[in-house]
Amino acid sequence: MQTRRQMLQRSATVAGLLASAGLMSLPGLALAADYNKAAFDAKTMADLMKALGAGAPVESKDVTITGPDIAENGAVVPLGASTSLAGVKSMLILVEKNPSILTAKFDVSDSVEAAVQTRAKMGQSSNVYAVALMADGKVLFAQKEVKVTLGGCGG
């Protein structure tokens, strides 16, 4: 049976080997590789599309947004976005009245179903958007109003 001391010594040895091979720094490199500060600083959909280099968004029945009509707790509001269209490059979830309109961005490909879900913090009732950025440059969206009864941003 292995003692705690032996296990820690072996772990330290393995960590030392990985560090000497340069493998310990890989997760740090991948952490913020695609971080777009201008996109997360955007306050309106127009500013966001400009920061992403995308065109003007067009409402579409092919994009769907899911979420509660009334969220009892704004700290954890379940939201989802999906589309069955081919050629989707990214799916976005936007909350209009949050300090940063961009809540989530998911990069997808044709080999991945463009259906995503997350939980978002909402400080107040707001319109929520599901946006599909297409490979051909089109930007399609759907919107839904979500009412918040208890604010998640200090309310």
Image: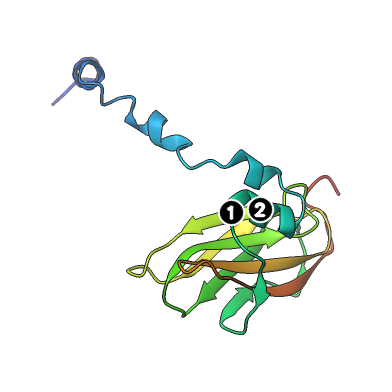
Q: Secondary structure at mark 2?
A: helix
Residue lying at 22% horizontally and 22% vertically, measured from the top left: 18
Q: Secondary structure at mark 1?
A: loop
Question: How far from the left and from the top, in percent, is residue 111?
Answer: 32, 69
When the figure is inspected, residue 45 is found, relative to residue 36, above or below; the finding is below
Front-most of residues 32 and 57: 57
Asked if disc 1 and disc 2 are in contact, CB closer than 8 Å, the reply is: yes
Q: Quadrant of residue 77?
A: bottom right
Amino acid carrying mark 1 in the image: Gly
Residue farthest bottom in this picture = 61
User: Badge 2 is on which residue?
Assistant: 50
Residue 75 appears anywhere in the view: no
When the figure is inspected, residue 9 is found, relative to residue 63, above or below; the finding is above
Residue lying at 60% horizontally and 78% vertically, measured from the top left: 64
Q: Residues within 10 Å of mark 2 (few under 14, many from 20)?
A: some
Question: How far from the left and from the top, in percent, is residue 30?
Answer: 40, 36
Question: How far from the left and from the top, in percent, is residue 93?
Answer: 62, 61
Front-most of residues 128 and 43: 43
Front-most of residues 52 and 10: 52
Query: Which circle marks residue 99 in the picture?
Result: none
Residue lying at 86% horizontally and 49% vertically, measured from the top left: 155
Question: How far from the left and from the top, in percent, is residue 20?
Answer: 22, 15
Front-most of residues 65 and 11: 65
Q: Quadrant of residue 104?
A: bottom right
Residue lying at 53% horizontally and 40% vertically, measured from the top left: 35
Residue 62 appears anywhere in the view: yes
Amino acid carrying mark 2 in the image: Lys
When the figure is inspected, residue 134 is found, relative to residue 9, above or below; the finding is below
Mark 1 → mark 2, Cα distance in angstroms:
5 Å
Viewport quadrant of the N terminus: top left
User: Badge 1 is on which residue?
Assistant: 53
